[in-house]
């Protein structure tokens, strides 16, 4: 009798296990964003989270955990269960820059996450406060080199952020200096840029396009081969005399290491669904963000870019003598 029952019990357990996996997700999914609300990464995360939730049949909750270099958010992500109910939306700041700048992060993106895929590539824009009186990039360079005047205040979204590395790269290329003013995210930095508390900021079009609408923020240059349709009056960096500045920020989504493959497959599929959603496409286009197509979608391309840019930015941090934090 026992010999007869064992196969039946095994079959029943297999069916139950299969049903449990098939039911995923049975509850909301948390999408960690390691930056403060109101910035570029936060804006993109909310656009994608809503569409992914529709495909997954659950709510995808965006949880902002701002902090220096994105460290608090990344560390919570690393401590999360690998059950598919916690994922992280970030950009190359967390995935390829901060791991070099912040030893305390203790995060090796090559081995400690499961890539889901790229979400968007976004050009960077250099903008100044209208209160600064600076009208174009040559004027800004002249002002930065004028030692008879007070230092220009250059805001950024916090050490290790793409805004920080973009600012450092710009100063490195132009052989200029400015007074760095770090914030706990792009959102607070933009508030002070609009108020004239800081003079300039380099960040993604996702943040800069909306900020420039009211006239208190003046975009001077965009890091793209040609002017973009969303900011037709803004010259490229090449037009402004700094053609070497070519940083575009990639944003991406990852799950904790060893998240089950069937759940990873659902998350990858949900991201692709979101990127094909007409509403998402329109939102990304309005913000100057370019969604990946074809082979650039999925885990493999994100894994390739992460590995490449970890090495690229480690070299820049060394060459530009950017301080490494303990």
Image (cartoon, rainbow, N blue to C red):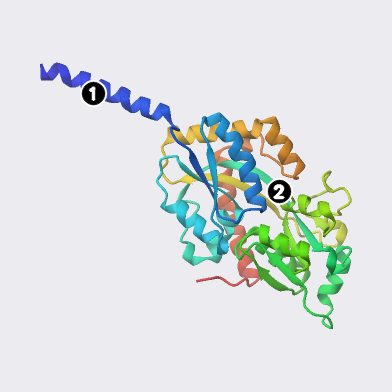
Question: Is residue 7 shown above or below 297?
Answer: above
- Give me the residue at 50% from left, 59% from top: 72
Q: Nearer the viewer, residue 215 or 15?
A: 215
| Residue 30 position in % (x across, y down) | 50, 44
Q: How many other residues sit within 10 Å of disc 1, few (<14), some (14-19) or many (≥20)?
A: few
At mark 2, the secondary structure is strand
Q: Residue 283 location in percent, x, y?
A: 72, 39
- Name the side, left or right, on which 280 lies relative to 243: left
The residue at 59%/59% (across/down) is 97
- Under circle 1, the secondary element is helix
Q: Residues within 10 Å of mark 2 (few under 14, many from 20)?
A: many
Counting from the top left corner in percent of width and height, residue 279 is at 70, 33
User: Does 181 sit above or below residue 244?
Assistant: below
User: Looking at the rendered structure, which numbered label has been put on residue 27?
Assistant: none
Above or below 101: residue 47:
above
Instruction: Say which residue label 1 marks.
Output: 10
Numbered marks: total: 2
Q: Are marks 2 and 1 in contact (CB under 8 Å)?
A: no
Image coordinates of residue 51 in percent, x first then y, are 61, 34
Extreme residue toward the bottom, this view: 148
* Nearer the observer, 65 or 172: 65
For residue 163, side relative to residue 271 (left or right): right
Task: Give the distance between the C-alpha atoms of the residues marked 2 and 1, in whole angstroms.
Answer: 51 Å
Residue drawn 56% across the image and 70% down it: 324
Q: Which residue is mark 2?
A: 122
Of labels 2 and 1, earlier in sequence is 1
């Amino acid at each position: 009798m026992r010999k007869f029952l064992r196969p039946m019990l095994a079959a029943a357990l297999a069916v139950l296990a299969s049903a449990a996996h098939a039911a995923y997700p049975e509850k909301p999914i948390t999408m960690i964003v390691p930056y403060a609300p109101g910035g570029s990464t936060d804006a993109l995360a909310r656009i994608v989270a809503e569409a992914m939730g529709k495909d997954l049949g659950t709510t995808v909750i965006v949880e902002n955990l701002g902090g220096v270099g994105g460290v608090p958010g990344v560390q919570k992500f690393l401590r999360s269960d690998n059950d598919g109910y916690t994922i992280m939306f970030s950009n190359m700041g967390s995935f390829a820059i901060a791991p070099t700048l912040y030893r305390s992060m203790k995060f090796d993106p090559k081995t400690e996450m499961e890539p889901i895929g790229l979400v968007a590539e976004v050009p960077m824009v250099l903008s100044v406060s209208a209160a600064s009186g600076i009208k174009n990039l040559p004027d800004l360079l002249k002002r930065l080199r004028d030692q008879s005047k007070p230092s220009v205040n250059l805001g950024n979204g916090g050490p290790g952020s793409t805004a920080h590395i973009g600012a450092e790269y710009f100063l490195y290329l132009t052989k200029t200096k400015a007074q760095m003013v770090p914030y706990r995210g792009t959102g607070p930095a933009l508030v002070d840029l609009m108020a004239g508390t800081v003079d300039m900021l380099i960040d993604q079009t996702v943040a800069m396009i909306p900020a420039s609408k009211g006239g208190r923020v003046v975009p001077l240059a965009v890091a793209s081969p040609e002017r973009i349709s969303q900011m037709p009056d803004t010259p490229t960096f090449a037009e402004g005399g700094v053609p070497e500045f070519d940083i575009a920020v990639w944003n991406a989504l990852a799950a904790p290491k060893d998240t089950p493959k069937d759940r990873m497959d659902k998350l990858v599929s949900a991201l692709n669904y979101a990127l094909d959603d007409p509403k998402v496409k329109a939102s990304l286009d309005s913000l100057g963000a370019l969604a990946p197509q074809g082979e650039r979608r999925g885990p493999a391309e994100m894994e390739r870019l992460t590995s490449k840019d970890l090495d690229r930015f480690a070299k820049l941090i060394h060459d530009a003598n950017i301080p490494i934090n303990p």
